[in-house]
């Protein structure tokens, strides 16, 4: 039996892979009444031979990491949807976001455990950069921005050549 291989659905996620840093804007929300600027470092890597992407996220405000998140993004072939299972330091339990690509934008949504809804958009239309928008809604119809960020991909450090011993 031949092992399954990732398909085009999985390869679409490769645009997320890399180390990203950038500025964020948090909008006032019940969990952060003032909002304000932040920065983030995001490390996305493929796992399971290309079937999924793991995301490690750290947000910094006032010079210290104040929020962390961890996600696994994969494709549910049965339901023909992308899925992001997300854990963060605010909730401590997973949330499941589901959705699809619209052009180069991965759009995912989820009910929130405390009520209401949230949705996330990863705009991958510019190589070496992506924009992220998190929105919330009490009723699933009227949406407000909660956080937005623009991240640039870090270029990998050049590999150092190893010196080889000369033969005599």
Image (cartoon, rainbow, N blue to C red):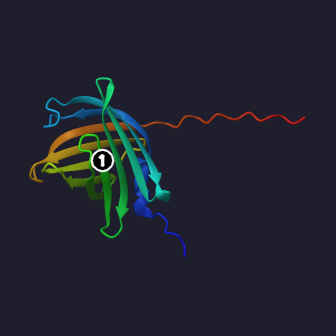
Q: Residue farthest to the right?
A: 168
Q: In this view, does 105 lie above or below 78?
A: above
Q: Is residue 46 above or below residue 42?
A: below
Q: Which of 105 and 35 is in front in this view?
A: 35
Q: Circle 1 is placed at which residue position?
A: 87
Tell me the quarter of the image containing the N terminus: bottom right
Residue 79, how many percent across, how many down?
Answer: 30, 68
Is 164 displayed left or right of 5 in the figure?
right
- In this orientation, does residue 52 appear? yes
Tell me the quarter of the image containing the C terminus: top right
Q: Nearer the viewer, residue 91 or 143?
A: 91
Residue 113, how many percent across, how many down?
Answer: 17, 51
Q: Residue at x 55, y 34 (%)?
A: 157
Classed neighbour count for the residue bearing mark 1: other residues with Cα under 10 Å, few (<14), some (14–19), many (≥20): some
Q: Residue farthest to the bottom?
A: 1
Q: Is residue 73 above or below residue 160?
A: below
- In this orientation, does residue 102 appear? no
Residue 58, how many percent across, how many down?
Answer: 35, 36
Residue 31, how many percent across, how many down?
Answer: 16, 36
Q: Residue at x 47, y 58 (%)?
A: 48
Picture mark count: 1
Is 16 displayed left or right of 160 in the figure?
left
Quarter assignment of residue 131: top left
- Secondary structure state at the residue bearing disc 1: strand
Q: Which of 85 and 18 is in front in this view?
A: 85
Is 151 displayed left or right of 154 in the figure?
left
Q: Residue farthest to the front?
A: 92
Q: Residue at x 19, y 40 (%)?
A: 146
């Amino acid at each position: 039996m031949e092992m399954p291989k990732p398909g085009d659905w999985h390869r679409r996620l490769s645009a997320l892979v890399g180390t990203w840093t950038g500025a964020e804007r948090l909008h006032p929300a019940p969990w952060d009444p003032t909002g304000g600027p932040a920065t983030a470092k995001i490390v996305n890597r493929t796992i399971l031979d290309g079937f999924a992407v793991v995301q490690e996220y750290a947000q910094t405000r006032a010079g210290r990491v104040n929020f962390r998140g961890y996600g696994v993004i994969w494709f549910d072939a049965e339901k023909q949807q992308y899925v992001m299972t997300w854990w963060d330091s605010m909730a401590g339990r997973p949330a499941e976001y589901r959705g699809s690509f619209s052009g180069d934008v991965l759009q995912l949504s989820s009910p929130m455990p405390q009520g209401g809804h949230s949705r996330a958009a990863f705009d991958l239309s510019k190589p070496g950069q992506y924009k992220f928008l998190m929105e919330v809604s009490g009723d699933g119809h009227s949406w407000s921005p909660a956080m937005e960020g623009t991240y640039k991909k870090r270029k990998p450090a050049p590999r150092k050549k190893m010196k080889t011993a000369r033969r005599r």
